Image (tube, coloured by chain):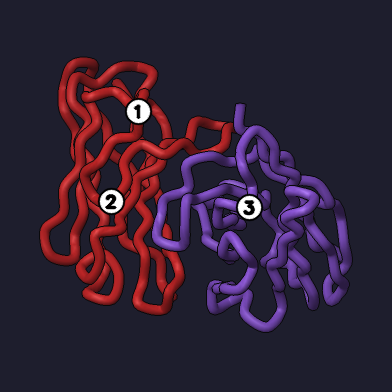
């Protein structure tokens, strides 16, 4: 089981938008609408930001949105704020009845 | 409020065993699937295992299959991870988390317990 592929890092200035990709296969990302995104600040536990490809839990800012096309899911953060600086992980259900995480993307707000 | 508190971590020699616990409170534990996820120092998240609400279904990541066993005691609101034949590469912070079911996301996480495998 290899991790889903994410860029190691992305950056953006306050107010800008960024997109983080998450590429898998037809046995995970492409095969199911069970893709989630997690935010993790240093020294903290992960926090659920997006579930079932596009859904935001209550309390998560509308600046966070997500989509999927084929085997690639994407997380977009608009109106970047300093507090968005964190690591972001995608996760997908797989055909083995297991879950898999992406390698993680470090977001830097310039 | 939802609380998940892991315990049982520590330093252990390669080849030895360790049992982690996660005590849950603030929600109806027996209604939720429970997960273990680990994070090696400076590395990303790695999914470890999941157990269904009633304990009848368990799934493991390939690298843990046969060495790790997940279980739960709904009477004590606790989920366990028995780790055998530990390797240095099992060194990580181990988180427990809950999901509404096996196909649901992890909506609450504990703060983790650190396992260090070293001779």
The percent coordinates of residue A92 (x first, y second) are: 35, 60
Looking at the rendered structure, whether the residues under marks 2 and 1 are on a common chain is answered as yes
| Labels 3 and 2 positioned on one and the same chain | no
Name the residue rendered at 78%, 53% in the picture.
B75
**Colour of chain B in the rendered structure image:** purple
- Are the two marked residues, 3 and 2, in contact with CB atoms closer than 8 angstroms? no
Q: Describe the element under mark 2 as helix, strand or loop.
A: loop
**Residue found 24% across the figure and 31% down from its top:** A64
Question: Residue A58's image quarter?
Answer: top left
Q: Is mark 3 on a helix, strand or loop?
A: helix
In what element is the residue under mark 1? Answer: loop
Determine whether B36 is above or below B6 in the image: below
Question: Residue A73: x and y, percent?
Answer: 21, 54
Residue B30 marker = 3
Can I make out residue B59 in this image?
A: yes
Depth check, front residue: A83 or A9: A83
Q: Which mark is residue A58?
A: 1
The chain holding disc 1 is A
Q: Identify the chain drawn in red.
A: A
Q: Name the residue under label 2.
A: A52
């Amino acid at each position: 089981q290899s991790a889903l592929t994410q860029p190691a890092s992305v950056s953006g200035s306050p107010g800008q938008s960024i997109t983080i990709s998450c590429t898998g296969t037809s046995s995970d990302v492409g095969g199911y609408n069970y893709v989630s995104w997690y935010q993790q600040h240093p020294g903290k536990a992960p926090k659920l930001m997006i579930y079932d490809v596009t859904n935001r839990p209550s309390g998560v800012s509308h600046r966070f949105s997500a989509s999927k096309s084929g085997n690639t899911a994407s997380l977009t953060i608009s109106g970047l704020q300093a507090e968005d600086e964190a690591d972001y992980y995608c996760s997908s259900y797989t055909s083995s009845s297991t879950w898999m995480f992406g390698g993680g993307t470090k977001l830097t707000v310039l | 409020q939802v609380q998940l508190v892991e315990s049982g971590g520590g330093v252990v020699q390669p080849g030895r065993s360790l049992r982690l616990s996660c005590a849950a409170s603030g929600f109806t534990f027996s209604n939720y699937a429970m997960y273990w996820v680990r994070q090696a120092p400076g590395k990303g998240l790695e999914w470890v295992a999941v157990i269904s609400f009633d304990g009848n279904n368990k799934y493991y990541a390939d690298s843990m299959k046969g060495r790790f066993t997940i279980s739960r005691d709904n009477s004590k609101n606790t989920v366990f991870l028995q780790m055998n034949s530990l390797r240095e590469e099992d060194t990580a912070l181990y988180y427990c988390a809950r999901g509404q079911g096996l196909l649901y996301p992890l909506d609450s996480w504990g703060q983790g317990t650190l396992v260090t495998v070293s001779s």
